[in-house]
Amino acid sequence: MSARKIAAPRPTLESDDYLYEPCERRIRGKWFGRTVVDSTRAVLVWAPGKPVPFYAFPRDDVRFDLLSASLSPSRSRPDVWQWYDIVVDDRRAYSPVFQLDIDGLDDRLAFAWFRQGEPEPGDTVHIDEDEHWFEEEAEVFTHPRDPHHRVDALPSSRHVRVTVGDSVVAETRTPVLVFETGLPTRYYIPPADVDFSQLEESVLRTGCPYKGTARYWSFSAQSFSGQSFSGQQPAENVAWSYEEPLAGMEPIAGHVCFYDDAADVSVSE
């Protein structure tokens, strides 16, 4: 008779090593209207302690004629041997390209995605680097997508209630629940069930490679009334929404989600 099998919790992928795997997608990166890297031989790399992977490319797939040894190597990283600027005509992006100093990857170049433009030394004005990334012909934002990262948006009948102090900001029985690898469950509430009179739209916009571009709201002065929630004052950018989410995330279109450290989000069956 064979030994009885034992169930054990699934181990995490955490490692002190740099982990990588081949990627068969065509990856392209553009700055200032010029293609700087175009490759079907990239590898995805997970650095120790970092939740987001990055692409590393063979040197032959990178336009070295558009690179120059960095004038402003502002980052200090033990895993980087050399930083490069991207130079297109009279425009320069400072230190977005780096050569790794890691055994097994030191023949490749990697890119720091969407840094919002680092200024020239001594300059405080950020530069618009006109940066774009593509996987095949699909544009990708914020950072590379992780093939082991899953995001599911599921319609639900749970009762979700959002309060700030004694004030109900949102309440619904038709939320959409978003389950995302490594993150807490998020509860997206239909706009008809949100009291927007207690919110003020913010100028903040953020991007997610899985969901799209988010707009934000803060609690209005009327609803906030000088109170302090979770030790934060004022309560800014506490709710967000994706008006035009990416493919696969259509159920959350226009729905509003709240940070549970800025509001009381209660969930029941």
Image (cartoon, helix red, strand yellow):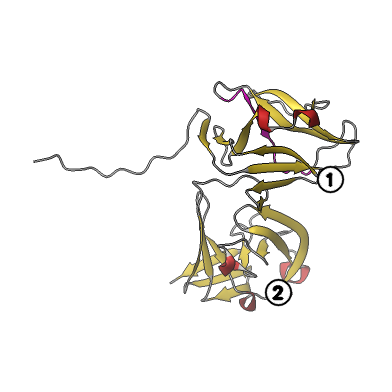
Could you tell me the amino acid type at mark 1? Asp
Answer with left or right where residue 129 lies relative to residue 237: right
Q: Which of marks 1 and 2 is nearer the N terminus?
A: 1
Residue that label 2 marks: 196
Q: Please tell me which residue lies in front, 135 or 243.
A: 135
Kindly give the residue lying farthest to the left in the view shown: 1
Q: Is mark 1 on a helix, strand or loop?
A: loop
> Separation of disc 1 and disc 2 at Cα?
33 Å
User: Residue 211: x, y in percent?
Assistant: 61, 58
- Specify the quadrant of the image occupied by residue 193: bottom right
Q: How crowded is mark 2: few (under 14 residues within 10 Å), some or many (20 or more)?
A: some
Answer with left or right where residue 172 lies relative to residue 12: right
Which residue appears at 59% of the width and 69% of the height? 162
Residue numbers of the magenta segment: 105-116
Which residue appears at 58% of the width and 23% of the height? 102
Whether 111 is among the magenta residues is yes
